[in-house]
Image (spheres, rainbow, N blue to C red):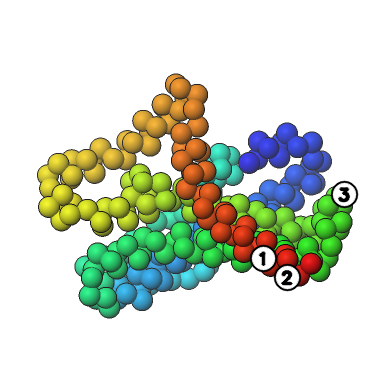
């Protein structure tokens, strides 16, 4: 994303402002994602996230510097993982369902944030007028519009990345809880989990060798239905407001 800014021809001050807006939007997306994990685990009976100070929207508790840098550079990244103890989940009878709820909470929060930001974009255009947003320079109204746009983009990207069926991402954790117990606790599966962290490296090497954006393609497919839902909701809202 920074590469795109460098190629945009923006002036130094404009580029600095854009980077600050990107960081702000990214912080909102990461904080909402990790807070949701912590909050759901806490509400289901596990105090671990609360004791670690993760049941908060304070960005300092959730943003991972390396994940943030990668998101700025290549378009996907991560926050500090929320640690919870599945054995402490006691407020729901089906503990595996509870684990799925915890895993799905982050991407659900990202979808909600993206939806809210998109709706606010529509309202802002209605109030300020499209001509103001498309004007030259970066005024206060345009800056707000860009933040909302970046929040939508980052939240949907974070949603798609975390739903990839690769360990240790949320998509993999959800699928893991759907496995038969005989498979989940088998020796073969434990060996697979030991190898699993190398899958990302294998995919990245394959991308470089084949010159195919494998992760980007998978993320685009995952993101598509969520983007369409938001688009249809905003289209309906536009028909009402305009």
Element class at badge 3: loop
Element class at badge 2: helix
* Nearest to the observer: residue 56 or residue 183: 183
Q: Residue furthest bottom?
A: 91
The answer to whether 240 appears left or right of 163 in the picture is right
Mark 1 neighbour density, 10 Å: few (under 14) some (14–19) many (20 or more): few
Mark 2 vs mark 1, CA separation in Å: 6 Å
The answer to whether 214 appears left or right of 103 in the picture is right
Q: Quadrant of the N terminus?
A: top right
Q: Name which residue lies at 53% across and 49% down.
A: 224
Do the residues bearing badges 3 and 2 touch, measured as CB atoms within 8 Å?
A: no
Disc 3 or 2, which lies upstream in sequence? 3
Q: Quadrant of the C terminus?
A: bottom right
Label number found at residue 236 = 1
What residue is disc 3 on? 136
What residue is disc 2 on? 240
Q: Nearer the viewer, mark 3 or mark 1?
A: 1
Mark 2 neighbour density, 10 Å: few (under 14) some (14–19) many (20 or more): few
Q: Quadrant of residue 180?
A: bottom left
Mark 3 vs mark 1, CA separation in Å: 29 Å
């Amino acid at each position: 994303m920074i590469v795109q800014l460098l190629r945009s021809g923006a002036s130094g001050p404009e580029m600095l402002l854009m980077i600050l807006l990107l960081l702000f939007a990214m912080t909102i997306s990461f904080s909402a994602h990790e807070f949701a994990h912590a909050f759901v685990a806490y509400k289901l009976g596990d105090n671990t996230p609360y004791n670690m100070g993760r049941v908060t929207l304070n960005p300092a508790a959730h943003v991972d510097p390396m994940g943030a840098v990668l998101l700025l550079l290549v378009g996907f990244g991560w926050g500090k993982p929320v640690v919870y103890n599945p054995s402490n989940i006691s407020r729901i009878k089906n503990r595996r369902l509870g684990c799925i709820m915890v895993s799905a909470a982050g991407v659900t929060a990202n979808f909600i944030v993206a939806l809210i930001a998109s709706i606010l974009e529509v309202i802002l255009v209605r109030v300020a007028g499209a001509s103001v947003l498309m004007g030259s320079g970066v005024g206060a109204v345009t800056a707000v519009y860009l933040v909302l746009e970046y929040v939508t983009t980052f939240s949907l990207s974070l949603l798609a990345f975390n739903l990839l069926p690769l360990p240790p991402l949320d998509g993999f954790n959800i699928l893991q809880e759907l496995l038969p117990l005989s498979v989940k606790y088998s020796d073969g599966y434990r060996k697979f989990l030991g190898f699993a962290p190398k899958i990302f490296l294998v995919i990245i090497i394959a991308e470089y060798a084949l010159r195919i954006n494998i992760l980007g393609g998978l993320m685009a497919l995952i993101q598509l239905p969520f983007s369409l839902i938001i688009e249809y909701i905003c289209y309906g809202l536009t028909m009402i407001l305009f």
